[in-house]
Image: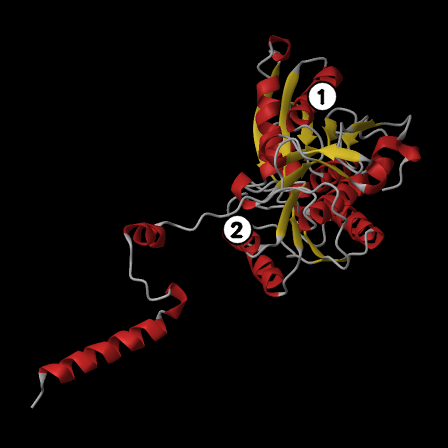
């Protein structure tokens, strides 16, 4: 039989147990204010930059290029890894052998598991890499895009070789002068989803809206997927499909070298203008044999160097990626973070017979 006093004793014991379990709360009961606090989402503390903070020792930095065997990106990444040695970091290059949209995802996941301090990526696709990169940032890993950007929410800083608008418009301006603003031309790009290529092509098309280009016609944008043989075949296909083609712009180092190689051994040499973005060492023989009059590019060594120091600045808390922040990038000096986290290396250089032997990259 249960007496009233027994019930009271049981109730007191239950209360004591509850208090023991809730000792952190002081067993003080739930007020309206604490009830509201429990339902409010936790606010994330905004990171603040400390420009005077030293670069952390032993930073683990990983470069993830579009593809591991791309000659241009090899130059960029080697320069970035050399820069890491300057600031006491440990850098490496990893990546796929193809430039497909999703080929970089598994590498990002592995780098997260390895607890890298910073991931630097030249994105094959602006969105395919977003999920894992956001996971990386959530875990405190600095994410820098270089050469080819990701979607803006998927990295903190983008290192742009030069103003995207200037690159795109200047390529059309250069070709226009060579063609005397007359004739059909094509664009030989990398992959269909490459952020940098598509941005430059958009600005090329805007430049073509100027009335001075009314005598020029863009007949096709072809894609060589940053593959030498495919780019070579695409060049052949363009010239067969448009026998009256007067010029080809290839804003990719793989593409312009492949196009120049095809034209140099064909009847089109001296008749079709090849222009675009290339490295001096790839293009030297085509400039000297008259296949290519000029092309342009920035120094990929500087791009890798700046990207590496930017990742170190992020991982060390010197910057957060907010507009207006400044930081030092070793021998290159001071840089400022612009709108949407963009940092611009500088204007491209035009290479021709007069200066190409001054460069070795």
N-terminal-most mark, 2 or 1: 2
Residue 229's spot in the image, x, y percent?
68, 47
Q: Between residue 133 and residue 214, name the one nearer to us.
A: 133
Residue 218's spot in the image, x, y percent?
59, 23
Q: Is residue 72 visible?
A: no
Q: Residues within 10 Å of mark 1 (few under 14, many from 20)?
A: many
Q: Is residue 206 visible?
A: yes
Q: Between residue 330 and residue 95, name the one nearer to us.
A: 330
Please identify the residue farthest to the top as the structure is shown: 211
Kind of element beneath mark 2: helix
- State the residue position of label 2: 134
Mark 2 against mark 1, which lies toward the viewer?
A: 2
Q: Is residue 44 left or right of residue 213?
A: left
Q: Residues within 10 Å of mark 2 (few under 14, many from 20)?
A: some
Pointers 2 and 1 in contact (CB under 8 A)? no
Kind of element beneath mark 1: helix
Image quadrant containing the N terminus:
bottom left
Q: Is residue 217 left or right of residue 166?
A: left
Residue 244's spot in the image, x, y percent?
64, 23
The residues bearing labels 2 and 1 have C-alpha atoms spaced at a distance of: 40 Å
Please identify the residue farthest to the front as the structure is shown: 5
Residue 207's spot in the image, x, y percent?
61, 18
- State the residue position of label 1: 175
Task: Determine the residue positioned at 57% across, 29% down.
Answer: 220
Q: Between residue 86 and residue 65, name the one nearer to us.
A: 86
């Amino acid at each position: 039989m249960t007496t009233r006093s027994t019930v009271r004793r049981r109730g007191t014991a239950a209360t004591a147990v509850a208090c023991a379990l809730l000792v952190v709360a002081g067993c003080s009961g739930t007020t309206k204010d604490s009830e509201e606090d429990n339902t409010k989402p936790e606010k994330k503390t905004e990171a603040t930059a400390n420009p005077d903070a030293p670069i952390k020792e032993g930073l683990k930095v990983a470069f993830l290029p579009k593809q591991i065997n791309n000659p241009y990106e090899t130059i960029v990444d080697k320069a970035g890894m050399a820069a890491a040695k300057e600031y006491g970091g440990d850098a490496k290059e990893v990546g796929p052998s193809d430039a497909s949209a999703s080929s970089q995802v598994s590498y990002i996941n592995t780098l997260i598991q390895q607890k890298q301090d910073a991931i630097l990526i030249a994105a094959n696709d602006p969105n395919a890499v977003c999920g894992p990169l956001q996971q990386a940032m959530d875990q405190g890993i600095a994410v820098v895009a270089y050469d080819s950007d990701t979607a803006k929410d998927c990295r903190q800083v983008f290192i742009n070789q030069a103003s995207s608008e200037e690159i795109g418009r200047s390529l059309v301006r250069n070709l226009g002068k060579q063609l005397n603003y007359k004739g059909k031309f094509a664009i030989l790009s990398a992959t269909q989803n490459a952020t940098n290529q598509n941005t430059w092509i958009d600005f090329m098309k805007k430049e073509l809206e100027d009335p001075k280009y009314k005598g020029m016609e863009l007949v096709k944008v072809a894609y060589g997927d940053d593959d030498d043989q495919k780019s070579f075949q695409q060049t052949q296909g363009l010239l067969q499909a448009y026998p009256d083609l007067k010029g080809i712009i290839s804003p990719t180092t793989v593409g312009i070298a492949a196009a120049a190689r095809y034209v140099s051994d064909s009847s089109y040499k001296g008749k079709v203008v090849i222009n675009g973005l290339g490295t001096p060492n790839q293009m030297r023989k085509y400039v000297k044999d008259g296949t290519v009059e000029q092309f342009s590019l920035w120094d990929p060594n500087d791009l890798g160097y700046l990207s590496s120091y930017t990742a170190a600045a992020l991982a060390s808390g010197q910057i957060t990626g907010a507009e207006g922040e400044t930081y030092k990038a070793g021998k290159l000096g001071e840089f400022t973070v612009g709108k949407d986290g963009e940092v611009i290396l500088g204007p491209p250089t035009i290479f021709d017979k007069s200066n190409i032997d001054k460069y070795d990259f």
